[in-house]
């Protein structure tokens, strides 16, 4: 009986808050058009999602994404979104820990929480670049709480890395579809391990398009203990949106 796995309950996303998605159209490698983003909102609302924090990439690869321009584009999009959906929207960002990170810090982060403390961060998938821990330390000294996006996806990371990050009080955000292998077998195994060990603080979709969720979500089958843990992570998400 302990090996039984189950699909997520039908009402799993009722009242849910998604804290990581690339729904803001035309700004990164996420949704390309307003029409596709609005369609996704309609589908997500039907599945019970109530609130979403849009987190476009802020990184050297997207030099035109800055606080002012993204805020302006978000306000234009939200004006269209309220016409088709009751989902409440806020904007934050997913910050790459690259050479431009500290300059973005000087201009003010778009944070996950209204208190202005929790910042979604990511690193290179292939290697933990020199200077990352120093940058994170510097912003933490200014009262910033790093939330590491999808730690299960970093190929270089092992158990020692994860333990070190938790010792430094980094928070972890799980990509839901990592648990069904969307990002490969290694990320899937790490996601189950980190969930079992209670390393995660939040869960997000990291949605770049709707097709992955429509195709893979029905394939997601978890142990009951894992579903219980995910439900708690969804509750944690609500504390960020306010």
Image (cartoon, rainbow, N blue to C red):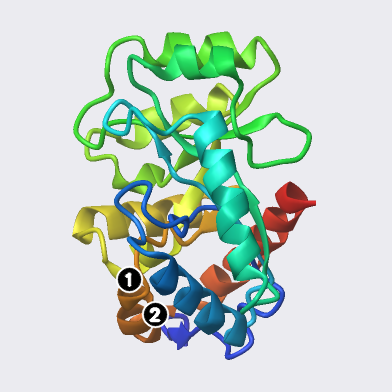
Q: CA distance from mark 2 to mark 1?
A: 8 Å
Give the numbered dot on residue 217: 2
Q: Is residue 198 above or below residue 145?
A: below
Give the numbered dot on residue 7: none
Callout 1 crowding tier (Cα within 10 Å): few <14, some 14–19, many ≥20: many
Q: Please provide percent x and percent y for residue 234.
A: 65, 63
Does residue 205 appear anywhere in the picture?
A: yes
Identify the residue shown where x is 48% and y is 29%: 66
Identify the residue shown where x is 27% and y is 18%: 129
Q: Is residue 156 above or below residue 221?
A: above
Mark 2 or 1, closer to the camera = 2
Identify the residue shown where x is 56% and y is 71%: 225
Callout 2 crowding tier (Cα within 10 Å): few <14, some 14–19, many ≥20: some
- Number of marks in picture: 2
- Seen in the image, is 143 located left or right of residue 21? right
Assign a secondary structure to mark 1.
helix
Identify the residue shown where x is 55% and y is 81%: 42
Does residue 52 appear anywhere in the picture?
A: no
- Seen in the image, is 195 located left or right of residue 230? left
Location of residue 78 (image quadrant): bottom right
User: Which residue occupies the foreground of this view, 148 or 56?
Assistant: 56
Give the numbered dot on residue 180: 1
């Amino acid at each position: 009986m302990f090996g039984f796995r189950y699909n997520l309950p039908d009402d799993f996303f009722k009242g849910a808050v998604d804290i990581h998605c690339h729904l803001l159209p035309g700004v990164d490698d996420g949704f390309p058009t307003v029409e596709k983003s609005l369609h996704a909102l309609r589908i997500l609302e039907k599945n019970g999602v109530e609130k979403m924090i849009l987190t476009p990439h802020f990184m050297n690869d997207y030099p035109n994404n800055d606080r002012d321009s993204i805020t302006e584009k978000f306000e234009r999009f939200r004006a269209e979104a309220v016409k088709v959906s009751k989902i409440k929207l806020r904007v934050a960002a997913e910050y790459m820990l690259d050479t431009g990170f500290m300059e973005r810090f000087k201009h003010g982060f778009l944070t996950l929480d209204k208190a202005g403390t929790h910042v979604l961060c990511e690193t290179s998938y292939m290697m933990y670049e020199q200077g990352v821990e120093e940058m994170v330390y510097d912003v933490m000294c200014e009262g910033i709480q790093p939330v590491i996006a999808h730690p299960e996806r970093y190929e270089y990371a092992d158990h020692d890395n994860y333990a070190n990050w938790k010792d430094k009080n980094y928070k972890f955000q799980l990509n839901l579809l990592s648990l069904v292998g969307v990002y490969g077998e290694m990320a899937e195994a790490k996601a189950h391990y980190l969930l079992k060990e209670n390393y995660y603080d939040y869960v997000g979709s990291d949605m770049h398009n709707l097709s992955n969720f429509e195709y893979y979500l029905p394939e997601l089958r978890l142990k009951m203990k894992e579903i219980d843990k995910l439900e708690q992570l969804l509750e944690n998400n609500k504390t960020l949106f306010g």
